[in-house]
Image (spheres, rainbow, N blue to C red):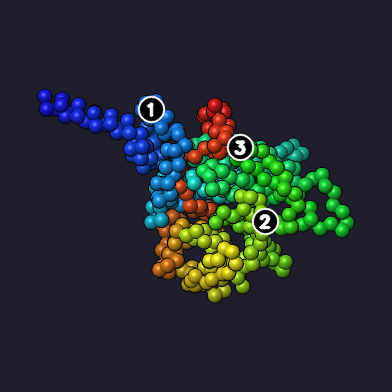
Amino acid sequence: MDETGGECVYRDKWYEVECAENVLVDILSRLPIKSILVCKSVCKHWRRLISSQVFIDLQLLWSRKNSVYIVYPFMDVMMELFFVKKSGEIAKRMNFPYCDNFSPITIICSFDGLLCCINYPWKVDSGRIVDDETDLEIRICNPITRKALLIPRGSPSKEKPSVGVAFGPKINDYKIFRFFFPKRIPLAKHQSRVNRLQCEVYSSISGYWSVIGRVPYCPMRSSHSPLGSNHVFVNGKIHWFIASDEDPMIPGLILTVDIEETFGTIDLPADVTEHSYLVDLKGCLSLVAVYDEDEIMNIWTLEDKNEPKWELKCSDNIPFSNDECVEFVVARENDIFLITSNHYYIFHSDHRVWRELELSNIFETHSPVAFTYTESLLSCGGRIDPMMEYTSERDRGWRF
């Protein structure tokens, strides 16, 4: 009798929790994404709650507190994603779900659980299948929900386009900026290559491209990521390097653009190097520069957004030799994650402590790249058109 009565009390209490939707939403939103997806099949009531924008937004707030690194072996045949904790422990690994029948894909940015991936589409040239380097296929992907959105093709370009993504203040609000050289505009004798450069933008709100027109600068292409350029989104703006006039391998300026499509430039501190990276360090635009000859690393931060002024946050000796190239750099809170030719390190910028991660045996020599990553349930297509997402691998039809 007591046991039966206890079950009744338990069910009554849980019924009260279910009726208080704000309490139930708060409980479910703290679960891992994998568990949340399972919970959607419990009943229609739970499915409705979990599918609501309020729940998706709340889950993202909790998830941001537990971000990890997502490491991707660039152009690896296996196409695997590795979710790495800052301790170096691999929390999860999964097959990249958007590479079937595609030319090699690379990730260029990560924000709130969404990845922007690009690849050159294939074309037939003289009977051979080759990459079409004058065009790009762009996908916004959510690897946890295994959904993706193929962005419509942009304008034809004579040369390799460059891409960056800006994220608006609202959840799922983003714009993709694409720099290209129009094919239909002939080059006059007095017209320089830069004068032909144009930019167009895709909006997740409208769902189509619009041409901005000519722009004076082209983002510098990274030598370590031939499909993309080193850029970072911080403080409401995308930031790219612009190559210096003296050496195209060394940054000379920073190009910026915000969600309102306003362009600008920022001067760099003196003596930047070829191994320089822009990162988001605790909400500040920061520059990590490795000096091979001196075997030191400098970290600069841009403290004043209105009157840009660089401050040297710290300088420290690097724990690797100068013949070992830095391949990629990303930041998470106060940590700097560096990928070199042979090693993986995390540098704590406040305490100036280096820690080597035991990842070399896993990634071998695949030249991986890394980004900070937060699990989310966000729709790849934004708020207005979530139906145009598709799933991958075996279920590859459009999901309505």
Query: What is the CA distance from the residue labelled 1 to the residue labelled 3?
Result: 31 Å
In this view, the mark in front (3 or 2):
2
The amino acid marked with disc number 1 is: His
Q: Which residue is under mark 3?
A: 150
First of labels 1, 2 by sequence position: 1
Q: Residue at x 53, y 66 (%)?
A: 303
Q: Which residue is under mark 1?
A: 45
Label 1 crowd (10 A; few <14 / some 14-19 / many >=20)? few
Q: Residue at x 60, y 67 (%)?
A: 307
Query: What is the CA distance from the residue labelled 1 to the residue labelled 2?
Result: 46 Å
Q: In front here: 375 or 175?
A: 175
First of labels 1, 3 by sequence position: 1
Q: Looking at the rendered structure, which numbered label has been put on residue 109?
A: none
- Do the residues bearing badges 1 and 3 touch, measured as CB atoms within 8 Å? no
The amino acid marked with disc number 2 is: Phe
Label 3 crowd (10 A; few <14 / some 14-19 / many >=20)? some
Say what secondary structure mark 1 lies in.
helix
Q: Is residue 170 something that shows in the picture?
A: yes
Residue 101 located left or right of residue 375: right
Q: Residue at x 66, y 64 (%)?
A: 253
Say what secondary structure mark 2 lies in.
strand
Query: What is the CA distance from the residue labelled 3 to the residue labelled 2?
Result: 26 Å
Q: Which residue is under mark 2?
A: 263
Say what secondary structure mark 3 lies in.
strand
The amino acid marked with disc number 3 is: Leu
Against 9, residue 365 (above or below) is: below
Q: Is residue 96 something that shows in the picture?
A: no
Q: Residue at x 41, y 29 (%)?
A: 47
First of labels 3, 2 by sequence position: 3
Q: Quadrant of the N terminus?
A: top left
Q: In front here: 242 or 15?
A: 15
